[in-house]
Amino acid sequence: MVTFRLPDDHAYAAASIARVVWRLSFTTLPAMVLLFSTAPLLHGWLRRRGEEIPYYLYAVSSAGSLAAVVIYPFFVEPSLRLGEQTFYWHGCLTVVAGLLAAAGYLFRQSSNAAGARSQPEDEVREPVAFGTGVLWLWLSALTCVGMLGATYHLTAEIGSNPLAWVGPFGLYLLSFTVVFSGRWRRWMTLTTLVWLAVSLSGFMVAKGFTAATVNAATAWWLLSLTASGSFLGNALLYQLRPAKRFETFYLVLAAGGVLGGLVSGMIIPVLLSQPIEFELASVALLTTGMLWFAGRRDPAFVAVTTCVLLVPVLILGLHQRRGEALGQSKLVHLRDLYGHLMIKTDARSVVLSSDTTLHGTQLTSDAAARHRPTRYYTESTGVGRTLEKLQAARPRMNVGVIGLGAGTLAAYARTDDTYDFWDVDPKALRVARENFSFVAESAGHVNLAEADGRKALEDSKTDYDLLVVDAFTGGGVPSHLLTHEALALYLRRLAARDGLLVVHTPSRYFRFFPVVEATARTLGHSAINVTTDISDATADRDWDPTHTEYVIVCRAEQLKAISDWFPAEEDKGRVKHQLDIIQAPLINAQLIWSDERNAAIDTINVGQFLFGP
């Protein structure tokens, strides 16, 4: 029986990416084999009946996959719980297996009735040159790397969720649907080649090798580059398709997709310290297309063409990198399977960021400056003011923080305070220890742990005065940190010390407050959204003018007192606070996230992301 299940919770303990890949492969392999073998199987049946190879079936299959990619985040994920999704998934797999069995039986019966027979064994088999097979593998892997590279840029902006896959993966599948429909012509390939060149130029100017935000304009260039690269790669594959050896063709294409995924996930993060594989894959596709158009394969021509196309991209990209580091004495890029970090250092400060998200800053001009909380964590922000108020009433505090960043909140720790930080990214812990001194020079007891904060809290017996959720990936937050079960766990750890929960929500395109508020109310608590704008710094506080948003979860009777902590204006308008409290008596059930049901579409403003404010 074909089954499908995801790894259980114990898989979290295995940090090795190889083990994660193995577990996912083992648990999903039977279902994947069934689904991936459907098209070649139908091709084989029709071929045995003497028909031409129906490559259009590959287009039909890709169209179905495209529909699923679009439907899932907009309709399935918001409407069905994980248990229901699993039930329907198993049901659909059973139906597919039954339909294949029925189709096989009908094919055999109709073939016998018509007296059809297999092709003669002595039929001359179509030879497949080694170079052709390599080119199939190259194009398949390259289009996959390009698609995954585009997805990386989107997840850096809107977080890792199914919505980030709709654009790149959807365009990738659309290219198969259109190209293999049987209506593709050579002039279309040439048009796609020009489209790719224009899109690459536009994307390099809009973003290139920089950490620029993937805003509306940049997102369209990114999607255009993804589409043109996918269409060109698959157009070349279509023109190189065999007349008979379809089974070898499909096998190599599948192997190329697997190879592209492995290279993107396990090799590129080791080889490239900066996420530029999307641009490099696009250049490689453009080079391959130009070589195809020229019809020449000699090494000298290949080398010259590659240099002519690659060198301008590298020059512009390196110029952009130098511009980002202008005035900085040092710019370091770190990358692993968890993502990309940049550390900028000059005589005055150290800045930590990941792609488009700034994680922390430390002033280094003198000892006093090093201990000042900066950026999102200054004294007048939601978390800064909450810490000051709690410290005024409590001589000793236990504080837990999910998400480390630069460890800035450790600057608030007093001698008898204990601060526990959890982060799943090992390089984040290393950076906080080696490049910043908030943790090392903190007056309190600071503990750093490489762990998922929610899992760590489940295993912990410590009670806390304050828990801070600050684990954003791009503009999103890992959904399992904001579910009903997660908030219930946080509140249990806060109950004994009458503590508060603070959630950092610094997102351009998401609105997390309604989700946190609705979920908190189901647990008998209230939530208040605190937006702070600091226009200027003073000599002793609020060192960085900034905009921040925090959600504070508390008991209903605490709501009035906490609201009084944040007056509309302070210091003659230097600091401005805006408070949001939802007064609706009814709770929108759609906004109550759980481990079984949570959807990014509940919180994202897709129109703002694609079309700007």
Image (cartoon, rainbow, N blue to C red):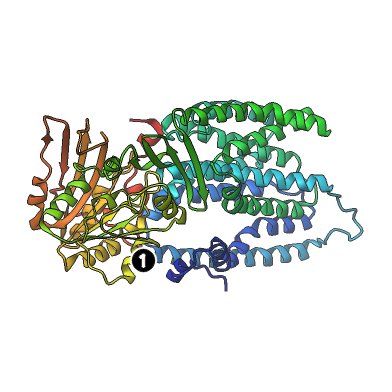
Residue 296 visible at all: no
552 up-or-down from 576: above or below: below
Look at the image and tell me in which quarter the N terminus lies: bottom right
Q: Residue furthest right?
A: 122
Q: Position of residue 115 (x, y in %)?
A: 81, 62
Q: To which quarter of the image does residue 224 belong?
A: top right
Q: Quadrant of residue 238?
A: top right
Is residue 215 found left or right of 516 in the rendered image?
A: right
Give SS at disc 1.
helix
Q: Which residue is mark 1?
A: 455
Q: Is residue 306 above or below residue 491?
A: above
Write the residue at 33% across / 71% down: 459
In this image, 528 relative to 353: left or right?
left
- Across and down, in percent, residue 409 comes to 28, 50
Say which residue appears at 36% left-offset and 30% top-offset: 612
Of the residues shown, which amino acid type is indicated by label 1?
Lys
Residue 507 falls in which quadrant of the image?
top left
In the rendered image, residue 30, in percent from the top left (x then y), is placed at 59, 67
Q: Quadrant of the C terminus?
A: top left
Q: Closer to the camera, 507 or 56? A: 507
Other residues around mark 1 within 10 Å, as few (<14) / some (14–19) / many (≥20):
some
Task: Pick whichever, 235 or 202, lies toward us.
Answer: 202
Residue in the foreground of this view, choosing between 154 and 241: 154
Question: Taking 578 as reference, is 262 above or below it?
Answer: below
